[in-house]
Amino acid sequence: MSAIGVAPGLGPGGPGGSAGPAPVRRGRRRSTPFFLALVGTAYLCVFFVIPLVSGLIVSLMTGNPDDGYTFTWNFGIYGSLFVDPQVPYLTFLLRSLWYGAAATIACIVVGYPVAYFIAFRVSPRWKNPLLMLVFISFLVSFIIRTDMWAFVLASQGPVVTFLQGVGLAGKDFHILGTGGAVIFGDAYNDLAFMVLPIYAALERIDPRLGEAANDLYAGKFRAFWHTTLPLSRSGIFAGVLLVFIDSVGDPVNSALLGGTNTYTIGQAIQDAYSGNQQYNVAAALSTVLMVVLGIILFIYARVSGTDDLEDLV
Amino acid sequence: MTGAVPGPDLLRGLTSARVSRRGLLAGGGAAALAALLTGCSIKGSAAAGAEDTVDWAAFWKDAKATGTLNFANWPLYIDSDHGKSESLALFKKETGIAVDYQAVIQDNATFYATVSPILRAHGATGYDLVVMTNGFELTQMIKNGFVCELDHSRLPNFAANASDSVKDPIYDPGNKHSVVWQTGFTGLAYNPKYTGRKITSLKDLQDPAFKGRIGLMSDNTELGSLGLLALGIDPETSTPADWRKAQAWLRELRPSVTGFYDQSYINRLENGDTWITQAWSGDVFQAQQSGFPDLEFVTPEEGQMTWHDNMLIPRQAENPVSALEWMNFYYTPKIAGIVEDWVNYVCPVPAAEDYVRDELDDATVADSPLVFPSADVLEQSHEFRVFENYDEYSEWNGIFNAVVQS
């Protein structure tokens, strides 16, 4: 924990210029922060509070697409979606959380070494090209990228044919249409969101800290475990936020790579909104998803103890 | 924000005679907020509907001919030679009307969700002609007065050349609002290489040998209709009790099903992920022509579904006369033949068969029973259930959604 406090002190420059601003009249000085906060507040209002509140309002409406929807304080909808519902939304929610968690872990396992390699093992002139390679797949449309995997993972596609050819898979083996394919798609599409923040965190670490650890008789692994990993924690935290939130709510990977038993909450929201025009159901599901994600990430933030939120980006 | 929560101070303030300024503000704020919220609503489709009756004879008499037509259609649904359409070019040559053809419709529900708020507010969608499948959304378009009634005196070619199978359909009696653009069949398609035998019946789906290799459609209407046909029930006249029976049949089949697909089902069949799949005739015909000659389309013993994509003129269209003109222009053997030779669904103009064979020299299309079906194939084809109201539709949806979503 204390390692975080050490890092800036060792870094070049340091937080200079603490001489303080020139004395100004007291009243103005007091009001300045409020004026400065105005832009941020307006931004939050327009892009966060208003959509959030309007979503909440729509979720409390009753009606149907034919007669329209009216606001009736229908809190009962939240219960009806999860207690003995026609459609098992709770199953979809739990399934989505599981897919999201699995994709996030997969991203950390794959993304951390990539970020580490680019940050510490590559000469500076190769860093930018390699980072470019990490997000070069973003140049192709998200849907196309995902749909291409449907071809690669298909039963007559190269992967399954190869596995069957070398005897690792039976005749009935298939990847496409399974939960594994969906998790793979989620992880694949979000990998860059994990690599980049971790890279940014690793890049800030002073290499001399590792040397110091070695001087203090720490082996390679211990040096990594006790200095590098804790110092990159903020990067992992940011990556987890980005990947987990994105994967849990995603309707595309499960639609394109999934099968009969991979229906997710994202698909349920999409189908409720644009398919069946059940605006209240869609809004209520979104609200529940948001609250559940909020709680999980709040707990995660408390447990992982990240208090330096400004380091996140 | 805390002021809005009625704490003990506020309660006392409101119940006692002495109302503090703060309490008054908070109470008033809460009341105003509540009033604002109860005023909140999303208008339904029915709201705009029947309120205005239009004198359509006068409407068409007053409507002015224009030089443009904005045509919204589905992707890959008109003849195209390097991006140029011969039929549209001929239309321009003959009538002087330039067509802005836009392939913007991907599925009925989403398209309806996009245009219905505009039409409800009596706004213009920007389209003069749209193509929608017979289904709940099309019924809604008609019922809510979102489309123009057609002037059949200006559609002589339709009367002369249209197939009987597309005249006076159950979903739009007398073709009052719509004429068919394309028809198609929903049957089964399979790959004999994997199945190893001929597929003839919906019962074949239950064969344990095909477990995990069956593809079905995620579209509720198609899925439910297949279940009904399998039980020998005509979907058109089915009742909610029948729907539940079909649901049970489909649920029993579910463990054998690989996935419930949208348009991508055809790729799954081509890839070998599915061996037998619910399929649209035109897709299979096109797949056969483009590298998958082995694939077979069958009309199951129990029958198949037939659907119609229809041309409609939305209200507030800027160029309704052009749209009507195009409808009439399309219903000739020549133009329908040119379009059909490319699109390969079921042609609404039977006489186009000779044009395709003799003039376009394309016997493959002309002889295909999928494009120009015989009378007994049409005999085995059933129409979708027409839903009277939202509750009925919603009941159907709830029943068959439960098969897809679990």
Image (cartoon, coloured by chain):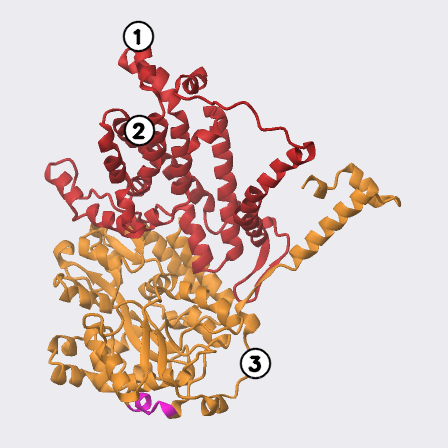
Chain colours: A red, B orange
Camera-nearest residue between B185 and A111: A111
Category of crowding for the residue at label 1, using alpha-carbon neighbours closer than 10 angstroms: few (below 14), some (14–19), many (at least 20): few
Helix, strand or loop for the magenta stretch, by majority: helix
| Residue B303 in sight here | no
Magenta segment:
B154-160
In-image side of A88 versus B21 (left or right): left
Distance from disc 2 to disc 1, alpha carbons, whole Å, reads 25 Å
Q: Is residue A149 magenta?
A: no
- Please give the name of the residue rendered at 56% of the width and 54% of the height, measured from the top-left corner: A58
The amino acid at mark 2 is: Tyr
User: What x and y, as percent, mark residue B209?
Assistant: 20, 50
What quarter of the picture does the N terminus of chain B occupy? top right
Q: Chain of mark 2?
A: A
- Please give the name of the residue rendered at 12% of the width and 63% of the height, measured from the top-left corner: B293
- Please give the name of the residue rendered at 47% of the width and 78% of the height, measured from the top-left corner: B315
Q: Which residue is mark 1?
A: A215
Secondary structure under tag 2 reads helix
**Residue B52, numbered label:** 3
Q: Quadrant of residue A44?
A: top right
Q: Quadrant of residue B153?
A: bottom left
Q: Which residue is mark 2?
A: A112
Category of crowding for the residue at label 3, using alpha-carbon neighbours closer than 10 angstroms: few (below 14), some (14–19), many (at least 20): few
Callout in the foreground (3, 2): 2
